[in-house]
Image: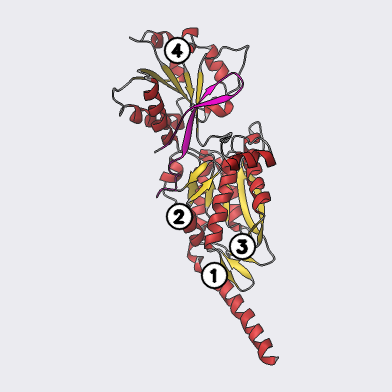
């Protein structure tokens, strides 16, 4: 009996030492103790927009994460706790939220966020300093992963990803005269650049005209005096006031098919009273409303209702993280150790099938081979007319 008791005390002591050693392995990265005791939950941070006019987008991210937690419930026998914080879509607020996540005790094992590119880019610098992985589900600025922090993996598409599918679809439609109309901001410029690079590789090469929204308002007449009429307008921008744009353009330009980029479509609102193009298409990746042919989507819709724009990709972010935590967690004594470096490595090695399609990452942390659709507005719904991938 004494030997058994001594062995039990020794086992407990070795467990505590192992837990302590695990917390020291990533000390150089400035990380907190990555140990979750047996009776404690795994903590996952969520940084998104939860206030203001566009807060519904942030709540869709939270709802997607909550849906996964209801489905999965535990990871390595630990319950899951979500820690949502409002980043206000503001870089300064995002930095403050990132610092708060990094200093929490106990600290989350990872964070899903941040909703706006400008906020995500600044927050990523904080996460790199403290060694806390981020899964981004909504930011599309290429700089987020190109700046080289290494601690961000993006499930959403980069601006540059739109060029290849747009060019392939344009080729199938034999569009030879294309107007690339953008809002003039850096993000829109990056999308236009990617589209130009892809379209220039087509044979025969289409004729392109690039104009900012401001330029189009000043010189709409010149746009219509092109040698040949436009076959397509590819509109690139946030699109919060598309109605105002369309009111200021000649009706003849609205007779041309319009393709809305993946950001503009989120804000598209059909109207019978306002002027709109007769034919409106959109770039969607991942398909935000889900693929009704997939059994897992039918299951999701049956249990949780119709998903919002960001709901499914947020659900997939939790699925990616759960898979990585399952592979990187080490049972030690009375708890589970998750070294930040091991979690990040497991995230980068992801190979799963999500609700939004297959998920894996390239060396920069961007998602590879993102499923993409071109959809046609049919008066009450978007109908897919073309499917492909971003690479």
When asked about the image quadrant of residue 382, the answer is: top right
Circle 2 residue: 349
Mark 3 or 1: the one toward you: 3
Residue at 43%, 39% in the rendered image: 142
Instruction: Say what secondary structure mark 1 lies in.
Output: helix
Residue at 66%, 50% in the rendered image: 71
Q: CA distance from mark 4 to mark 1?
A: 63 Å
Q: CA distance from mark 3 to mark 4?
A: 61 Å
What percent of the width, then of the height, locates residue 315?
60, 45
Q: Which residues are magenta?
A: 361-390
Q: Quick one: label 2 or label 3, which is nearer the N terminus? A: 3
Q: Quick one: label 3 or label 4, which is nearer the N terminus? A: 3
What percent of the width, then of the height, locates residue 391?
39, 38
Circle 1 residue: 22
Residue at 35%, 10% in the rendered image: 228
What percent of the width, then of the height, locates residue 338?
55, 63
Mark 2 or 1: the one toward you: 2
Q: Image height check: is 163 above or below 76?
A: above
Q: Image height check: is 15 above or below 280?
A: below
Mark 4 or 1: the one toward you: 1
Asked whether the beta carbons under mark 2 and mark 4 sit within 8 Å of each other, the answer is no
């Amino acid at each position: 009996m004494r030997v058994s008791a001594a062995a039990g005390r020794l086992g407990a002591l070795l467990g505590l030492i192992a837990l302590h050693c695990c917390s020291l392995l990533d000390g150089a990265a400035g990380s907190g103790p990555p140990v979750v005791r047996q009776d404690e939950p795994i903590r996952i941070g969520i940084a998104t927009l939860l206030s203001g006019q566009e807060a519904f987008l942030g709540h869709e991210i939270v709802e997607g994460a909550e849906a996964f937690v209801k489905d999965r419930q535990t990871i390595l026998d630990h319950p899951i706790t979500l820690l949502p914080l409002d980043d206000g879509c503001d870089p300064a607020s995002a930095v403050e939220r990132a610092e708060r996540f990094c200093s929490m005790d106990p600290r989350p094992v990872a964070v899903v966020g941040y909703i706006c590119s400008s906020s995500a880019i600044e927050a990523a610098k904080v996460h790199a300093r403290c060694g806390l992985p981020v899964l981004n589900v909504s930011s599309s600025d290429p700089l987020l992963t190109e700046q080289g922090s290494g601690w961000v993996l993006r499930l959403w598409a980069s601006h540059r990803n739109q060029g290849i599918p747009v060019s392939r679809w344009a080729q199938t439609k034999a569009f030879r005269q294309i107007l690339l109309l953008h809002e003039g901001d850096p993000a829109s410029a990056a999308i236009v650049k990617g589209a130009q690079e892809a379209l220039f590789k087509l044979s025969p090469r289409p004729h392109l005209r690039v104009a900012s929204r401001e330029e189009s308002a000043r010189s709409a007449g010149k746009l219509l005096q092109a040698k040949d009429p436009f076959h397509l307008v590819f509109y690139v921008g946030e699109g919060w006031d598309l109605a105002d744009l369309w009111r200021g353009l000649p009706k003849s330009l609205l007779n041309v098919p319009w393709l809305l980029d993946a950001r503009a479509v989120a804000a598209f609102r059909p109207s019978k009273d306002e002027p709109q193009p007769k034919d409106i298409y959109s770039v969607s990746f991942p398909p935000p409303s889900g693929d009704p042919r997939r059994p897992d989507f039918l299951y999701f819709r049956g249990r949780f209702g119709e998903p919002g724009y960001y709901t499914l990709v947020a659900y997939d972010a939790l699925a990616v993280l759960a898979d990585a935590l399952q592979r990187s967690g080490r049972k030690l004594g009375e708890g589970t150790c998750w070294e930040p470096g091991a979690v990040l490595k497991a995230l980068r090695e992801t190979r799963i099938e999500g609700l939004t399609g297959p998920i894996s990452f390239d060396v920069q942390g961007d998602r590879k081979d993102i499923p993409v659709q071109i959809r046609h507005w049919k008066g009450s719904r978007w109908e897919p007319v073309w499917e492909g991938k971003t690479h």
